[in-house]
Image (tube, coloured by chain):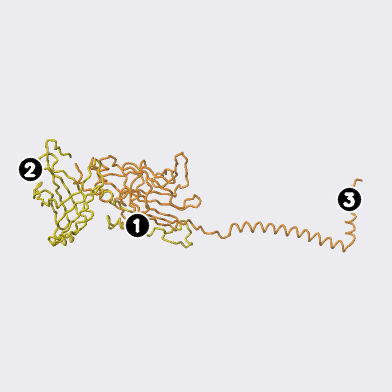
């Protein structure tokens, strides 16, 4: 859905990120200049400590990545971050438009979903603040879109007992596939002939 | 007197000489008797020889039929296909059994996943067996719907070599749903586990369209293994929307997308 901004001479925008970390929490943060409640959800303002890479806009669903970098993470929070499975978390990034005075534009399509996917990889980078004698960390979340996930998804039941029992644990129909591989049948042999393999 | 008469005279005189001499006559008699005996003996020997050869061909030990060694190679990495609309498919081997003193082989060929319900009608999709092919020839079945009587290739050539030797039992959704091949009035052979040797009710092959093929060995008819099988199947799920929705949402063989994430579903 397009956002019609033609009636405005100047606007500002901010990104609002929802990061759903399994068994931990859903984090809501934005690069807006103040805390803001959008669609009933309160977002923590990280301001310029949050950077989001450019996204691609294409008519067809294409596989692309986005990088979300959170800077200035205190060293004391690193352990908590690393103890939780950020990798694989679902992430949604929305872009909201405001007037230059910070008033939310009540127009159709605002806010617009910019990216939906999962965190594919996480990077940590330590920066030493000599003046403050403190270590601060940057966290880079490399996110993969749903199109990439679907492209890499392995689906389908294979003809082996493991796959079959994943879906139908009591079925024995494919139990002999590994046994049959390279086994021999002396089809038509007289019963006095010794046959090899599995009968 | 002709020269023939002269020869006759010589013979008479020689015969008379032999007759006149008892020694020569005895020797001649022995020689002639020996000759006659020899002829008779050799004749009897020849007769015996021919009789012996005839007997030999009838009573010599016949080498036992060694049969045909089949080496099967099912692929455990093969994914079971999904069919929408109509398709020809060969089948994936998942089981084989030999029975009846090595004279019959049973094969289980998995053909397709069973698809979900039609979004357009809410009815369950149904798979139909249109035709079965053996070595590129369409099998014509007997009235029982499972026993092949001949094959017809694309040129109309009829091959009766598999008559009575190949039986095909079709299942459209697991072991307990036998299917009748299109245009036959019978052919449902009962539960698959009741047919396939050594199968039990735990051999269910759930949500699978498959076929059991029974082959009777025949050296004379050159039927000694599974031919190249093709099945023509038609899924009642044919509409684009039905197929897309089914493939997008199915977690077993499709993309597994939550219906909540798909607009208007």
Q: Position of residue A107 (x, y in %)?
A: 11, 39
- Mark 1 belongs to which subunit? B
Residue furthest to the front: A131
Q: Residues within 10 Å of mark 2 (few under 14, many from 20)?
A: few
Instruction: Identify the residue at horizontal 12%, vertical 43% (top origin).
Output: A12
Q: Chain drawn yellow, letter?
A: A
> As rendered, which of A110 and A25 lies closer to the eye?
A110
- Mark 3 belongs to which subunit? B
Q: On the image, numbered disc 1 is attached to which residue?
A: B199
Q: Position of residue A34 (x, y in %)?
A: 8, 49
Q: Position of residue A172 (x, y in %)?
A: 32, 57
Secondary structure under tag 2 reads loop
Q: Tell me, what hue is chain B? A: orange
Marks 2 and 3 sit apart, C-alpha to C-alpha, by 157 Å
- Mark 2 belongs to which subunit? A
Residue furthest to the right: B1
Pair 2/3: label in front: 2
Secondary structure under tag 3 reads helix
Q: On the image, numbered disc 3 is attached to which residue?
A: B7
Q: In terms of sequence position, does the residue under pointer 1 or pointer 3 come before the other?
A: 3
Pair 1/2: label in front: 2
Marks 1 and 3 sit apart, C-alpha to C-alpha, by 96 Å
Pair 1/3: label in front: 1
Q: On the image, numbered disc 2 is attached to which residue?
A: A101
């Amino acid at each position: 859905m397009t956002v019609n901004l033609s009636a405005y001479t100047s606007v500002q925008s901010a990104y609002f990120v929802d990061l759903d970390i399994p068994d931990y929490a859903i984090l809501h943060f934005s690069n807006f200049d103040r805390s803001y409640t959008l669609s009933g959800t309160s977002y923590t303002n990280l301001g310029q400590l949050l950077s989001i890479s450019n996204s691609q806009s294409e008519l067809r669903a294409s596989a692309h990545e986005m990088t979300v970098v959170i800077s200035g993470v205190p060293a004391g929070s690193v352990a908590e971050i690393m103890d939780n499975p950020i990798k694989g978390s679902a992430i949604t990034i929305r872009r909201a438009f405001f007037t230059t005075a910070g008033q939310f534009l009540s127009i159709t399509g605002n806010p617009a979903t910019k990216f939906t996917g999962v965190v594919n990889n996480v990077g940590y980078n330590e920066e030493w603040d000599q003046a403050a004698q403190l270590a601060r960390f940057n966290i880079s979340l490399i996110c993969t879109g749903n199109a990439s996930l679907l492209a890499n998804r392995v689906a389908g039941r294979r003809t082996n007992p493991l796959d079959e029992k994943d879906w139908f644990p009591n079925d024995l129909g494919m139990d002999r596939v590994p046994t049959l591989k390279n086994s021999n049948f002396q089809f038509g042999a007289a019963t006095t002939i010794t046959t090899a393999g599995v009968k | 007197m002709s020269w023939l008469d002269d020869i006759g005279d010589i013979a008479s005189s020689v015969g008379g000489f032999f007759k006149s001499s008892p020694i020569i006559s005895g020797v001649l008699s022995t020689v002639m008797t020996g000759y006659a005996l020899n002829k008779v003996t050799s004749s009897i020997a020849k007769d015996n020889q021919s009789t012996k050869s005839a007997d030999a061909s009838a009573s010599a030990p016949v080498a036992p039929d060694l049969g045909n060694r089949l080496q099967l190679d099912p692929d455990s990495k093969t994914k079971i296909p999904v069919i929408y609309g109509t398709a020809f498919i060969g089948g994936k081997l998942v089981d084989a059994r030999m029975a009846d003193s090595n004279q019959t082989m049973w094969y289980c060929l998995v053909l397709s996943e069973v698809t979900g319900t039609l979004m357009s009608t809410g009815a369950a999709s149904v798979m139909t067996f249109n035709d079965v092919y053996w070595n590129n020839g369409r099998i014509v079945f007997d009235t029982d719907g499972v026993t092949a009587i001949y094959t017809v290739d694309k040129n109309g050539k009829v091959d009766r070599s598999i008559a009575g030797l190949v039986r095909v039992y079709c299942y459209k959704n697991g072991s307990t749903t036998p299917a009748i091949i299109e245009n036959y009035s019978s052919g449902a052979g009962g539960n698959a586990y009741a047919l396939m040797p050594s199968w039990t009710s735990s051999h269910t092959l759930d949500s699978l369209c498959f076929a059991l093929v029974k082959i009777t060995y025949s050296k004379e008819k050159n039927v000694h293994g599974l031919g190249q099988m093709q099945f023509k199947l038609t899924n009642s799920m044919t509409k684009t929307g039905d197929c897309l929705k089914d493939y997008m949402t199915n977690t077993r063989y499709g993309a597994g997308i939550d219906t909540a994430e798909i607009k208007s579903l």
